[in-house]
Image (cartoon, rainbow, N blue to C red):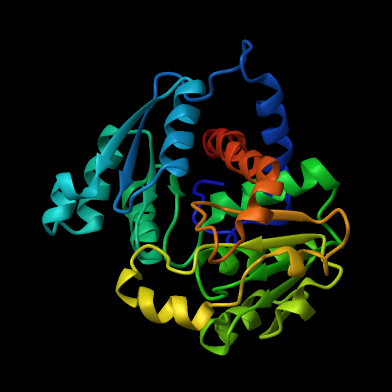
Amino acid sequence: MKHLLSIEALGKEEIETILSRAAEWKRLRGSEHPKPLAGQTWAMIFTKPSTRTRVSFEVGIHELGGKPMFLNAGEIQLGRGEPIKDTARVLGRMTHGAVIRTYEQREVEEFARYSGIPTVNALTDQEHPCQILADIFTIQEKRGPIAGKVVAFIGDGSCNVPISWIFAAAKLGFELRIASPPAYQPPQAILDRAGGNIRVTVDMREAAKDADVLYTDVWVSMGREAEAARRLQELTGYQINRELEKLAKPNALVMHCLPAYRGKEISEEVFERHAQTIFDQAENRLHVQKAALERLVS
């Protein structure tokens, strides 16, 4: 695995290896352990704001023995119009790897192609692979193998998080249900490409019934702020609340990739009741990403 660009591009064995090693890295944290990035400098190029992604990658690279170098895209020549392939060819000669958080998937893929160094997609509008790997790790940590389980995604089913869930479902053998208004459902072309046991519906109650996991994300993703008023109106009601929670299995996990806007995609009551899971989910970004970085350089 030279790059981590999408869930779609990962094989089942690669995913399982990352998840297995993530458990080891979590167990070893705070003790003496190998430093697979020793002597390396990794560029972190971020066009979008970030809390969890930036912190988890900076800490993870440091704990693996490397040095993270944060580059705000607006403060380098990329922000003044330099082509991504030229930035890639420069950084490929000076750094050992790159973590990129940006808008277009094609930019991450182009960087990987021209840089010649391991490249990680830390979020694009099309996919969020590191988030979904951490989510699956969290589910398996708390409820055992994800194969055969039911994950219900409630809300904007066309954004990067559910798209990555779609590709994961086909590879790992679980059922994915997506409940969204018609305008927010995933493209049929992606569903056809992924295969797997995936059901898309407008009916939240149908999606939540007997689910093992209820999952949601913000209604207004980064870059969609101009659409905020319309999105808030059209997605109103697609909320994980106590009534929806009761339809899922009694021990169902409630998950959110954060940041959360209580009273919109999730109620305050349900969020706080499941805060332990949600913040375990956030912490697990660190352990899973360390496993992925190790895999990239092994």
Q: Where on the picture, by quarter, is residue 105?
A: bottom left
Residue at image position (57%, 89%) is 182
Tell which of 63 and 207 is nearer to you. Answer: 207
x, y percent for residue 132: 61, 54
Whether residue 118 is visible, yes or no, is no
Location of residue 130 in the rendering, given as x and y in whole percent from the top left corner: 55, 49
Left or right: where 218 falls relative to 74? right
At a point 78% along the width and 41% down the height, the residue shown is 141
Q: Nearer the viewer, residue 3 or 165?
A: 165
Q: Residue furthest top?
A: 32
Left or right of 22 on screen, residue 66: left
Quadrant the C terminus occupies: top right
Residue displayed at 60% across by 77% down = 237
Q: Taking 8 as reference, is 141 above or below it?
A: above
* Towards the viewer: 225 or 195: 225
Q: Is residue 152 above or below residue 78?
A: below
- At 42% from the left and 42% from the top, the residue drawn is 51
Residue 194 location (% of width, % of height): 65, 74
